[in-house]
Amino acid sequence: MATDPLPAATMPVSIDDVRAAHARIRDSIVRTPTLVSRTLSDLTGATVYLKFENLQFTAAYKERGALNTLLQLPAGTKGVIAASAGNHAQGLAYHANRLGIPATIVMPTTTPTVKITQTEGHGATVVLEGATFDAAYAHARLLEKERDLTFVHPFDDIRVIAGQGTVAIEMLEDVPSIDTFITPIGGGGLISGMATVARAWDKPIEVIGVEAELYPSMYNRIHGTDMPCAGDTLAEGIAVKEPGAITSDMVRVLVDDIVLVSERSLEESVSLLLQIEKTVVEGAGAAGLAALLAYPERFKGKTVGVVLCGGNIDTRLLANVLLRDLARSGRLARLRIRLQDQPGALFNVARIFDQERVNIIEVYHQRVFTTLPAKGLITDIECETRDRAHLDRLMAALHEAGFEASPVELA
């Protein structure tokens, strides 16, 4: 990976391309703030600056590359087409509609209805085809030829890469002291653009990419490994099985390293950003913070720029993430308690909860589907505590009273 900035001169995208893209698009996008997080800085030992790209109109940085591409299309372009079930679809649809360019977006048939509705709301024609992204992509390339449309790739296009690089321009203009970028990698468009800027800047800037452990596609490409790319990741926006050809070459030359983060780290980061910064990010948008939390020694003492690249997360999924985080921190728990089937048994347990000032949320009483004898029963009690120490005191009180109790742990 990157050891010498000189090869950057041979790359297909230059700092001049990124500066030109910024001049082209800046009046039509939100110049999102880059703000220091004192709490996250204290937590990690780095000075942490967050770039709030989740505040773009379509809640993601993808608008930048899409708009830069649209503004360079030749006169008389009949329309554009893309294959996407995510942020690229909405960014392209929104700006194409604003510019009066017809847009067609091909999505897999499994795409959630809310994403279809949002994309159509930006004026695009949505075509549902195939159960996978690959099938949707193949159909989009077919329609491109049949209907004489212009295909706009979500990441493997120099105009898109230059547009995404404008994120780094703004961050360094706003905070010149940044010496490290931590950037999510899916197909590689964002990090390729940002690394182009970093390598051409007037001081050394380290560029670290982040992928979900379940989808280490760029890591595999660069390091020659063959780890599987599959599974349900919270970071669906960077769940890419095959990175781009152009972006892979750029990452190999310009990026210092790629780290992998677990699903648990991603969940924790989404929750922390909501609690600490009062901002909603999707799983991919939280990947930079997840890396910072997972590898604190690597970034300690550095001035780090983290891109919150998107905020499009399903509200039900967000609720699950927040509740799971409460459970892991001990503030929400489900306790499995063995009781005798006799009057007053549940009352005696509830009295201990009252003594310890623990709030009971739900009670599940199970008499039939249990391996206990007929006179035994299992009670699951969901409860709310102040913290892990408070939960531990409750458990100790239950055991002292003679009850068999154990927490139902999360994965």
Image (cartoon, rainbow, N blue to C red):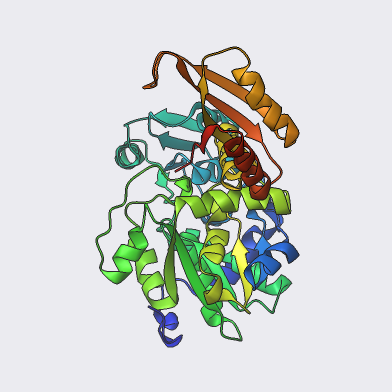
Q: Nearer the viewer, residue 276 or 333?
A: 333
The number of numbered badges drawn on the structure is 0
Percent coordinates x, y for residue 381 in the rendering? 58, 27
- In the image, is residue 36 above or below residue 266? below
Q: Is residue 259 left or right of residue 38?
A: left
Please indicate whether residue 28 sits to the left or right of residue 124 in the image.
Answer: right
Name the residue located 60 percent from the left edge and 40 percent from the top edge. Answer: 395
Residue 128 in the image: state x and y as whole percent.
39, 29
Query: Which quadrant of the structure image shows residue 373?
Result: top left
Asked whether 183 or 121 is in front, the reply is 183
Looking at the rendered image, the quarter that the N terminus falls into is bottom left
Along the line of sight, which residue is nearer the eye, 241 or 38?
38
From where the camera sits, is residue 96 visible?
A: no
Residue at 61 percent across and 79 percent down: it is: 179
Q: Position of residue 88 (x, y in %)?
A: 50, 46
Q: Residue at x 68, y 59 (%)?
A: 26
Position above or below: 53 against 103 = below
The quarter of the picture where the C terminus appears is top left
Q: Residue at x 40, y 58 (%)?
A: 156
Residue 404 in sight in this render = yes
Q: In the drawing, does residue 35 fall left or right of residue 220? A: right
x and y percentages locating residue 152 in the rendered image: 44, 49
Asked which quadrant contains residue 43, the reply is bottom right
Q: Is residue 337 above or below residue 199?
A: above
Depth order, front residue of 386/109: 386
